[in-house]
Image: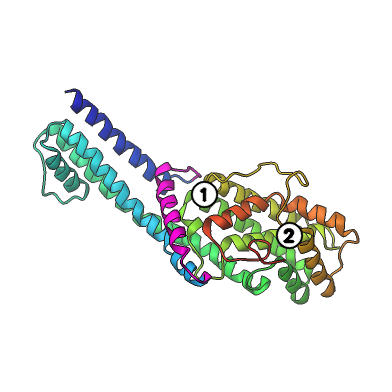
Amino acid sequence: MIAELIAFVIGLGIVVSTLYSAIRSLVLPRAAPDPLTSLVFYTYRVLFRLISLRARTYKSRDRLMAYLAPLAELTLVPVWFTLITFGFMCIYWALGHGTWYESFRLSGSSLLTLGFSTSNVPLVSVFIFSEATIGLMMVALLIAYLPTIYAAFSRREVAVTMLEVRAGNPPSPVELILRFQRIHGLDRLTEQWQMWEKWFADIQESHTSFTALVFLRSPNPEHSWINAAGTVLDAASLTLSTIDYPNDPQAALCIRAGYLALKNIADYFGIPNIHNPQYPRDPISVTREEFDEACVLLTNAGIRLNEDLEQAYQDFAGWRVNYDTVLLEIADLIMVPNARWIGNQPG
């Protein structure tokens, strides 16, 4: 009797925990890290990172890493189904349906709605119908879940692809400013900051609600959403700190939207970050030499800079410190291509 009670409690606990995991991963519209989902993605990330060490070029590594998110996402379904099957197996055995194998057959038949095994015991029948309902609900949730993910993915990638036109490939904050100076004029940058502020807000909402989006790679192996984010944030920081141009509050709003989005994504994945960083107490990864090289490129293109470049670097670092650590950590997490001030390439 005690063994049956323990089995029933364990089985019910597994079923409830698995449903809770599925709800947090597929239904709940907010950042709610789930241990089971995180474990699946972490396992695939470790496995793919080990396999990618044998890749000789970035493109071959990118082709491999492109399968990480889809495989991890599809693996969640059999993991959930396996746990639910095991949980109800314990329940059926505790209710006296028969041996463990007979309980397993009943559980699998009920969850997959195959109907080749059943029971005439009223209480067992209640759980059979409950398990069948859960199975149908899980399938329905998955069908509705995938279009939602790829709709958010499409919105993200449109902006990332458009950035290549304005910032080059790989994207560079300096190139973004130079092209606007040549084609539109720097006053048109305000429109860009507004567009990317909305983009960051979308990223914060979607990438903390749907884990797979963070790992889904761009169709073009040389593109990456995190590189695009870093490029725009650095361009806005250079505009506010270095260029002799009227202060644009929209650039500051874009930076704030960006680092809040990146910090929320970092918090979701448990990436350590300083929530109130201050320069020079907290250093940045962009060196003064790299900053000076960017200033030379801007000056040679006829863009007027602030006279005090030492203060300009201090101001630039004051903006960059807000997102420097989380930007690099997320870039390492998803193994992105090198870009200006994100990989090992200079600005």
Q: Which mark is residue 208?
A: 1
Determine whether 111 is above or below 246 in the image: above
Determine whether 256 is above or below 53 in the image: above
Residue 42: x and y in percent read: 44, 50
* Closer to the camera in the image, 27 or 306: 306
Asked if residue 309 can be seen in this view, the reply is: yes
Residue 145 picture quarter: bottom left
Provide the secondary structure element on which disc 2 rests. Answer: helix
Left or right? Give the position of 23 relative to 278.
Answer: left
Residue ID for mark 2: 236
Is the N terminus in the top left, top right, bottom left or bottom right quadrant? top left
Determine whether 189 is above or below 88 in the image: below
Residue extending furthest toward the bottom: 183
Q: Is residue 237 magenta?
A: no
Report the predominant secondary structure element of the magenta stretch.
helix
Residue extending furthest toward the right: 307
Asked if disc 2 and disc 1 are in contact, CB closer than 8 Å, the reply is: no
In the rendered structure, which segment of residues is drawn in magenta? 30-58
The residue at the point 38 percent across, 42 percent down is 21
Name the amino acid, label 1. Thr
Name the amino acid, label 2. Ala
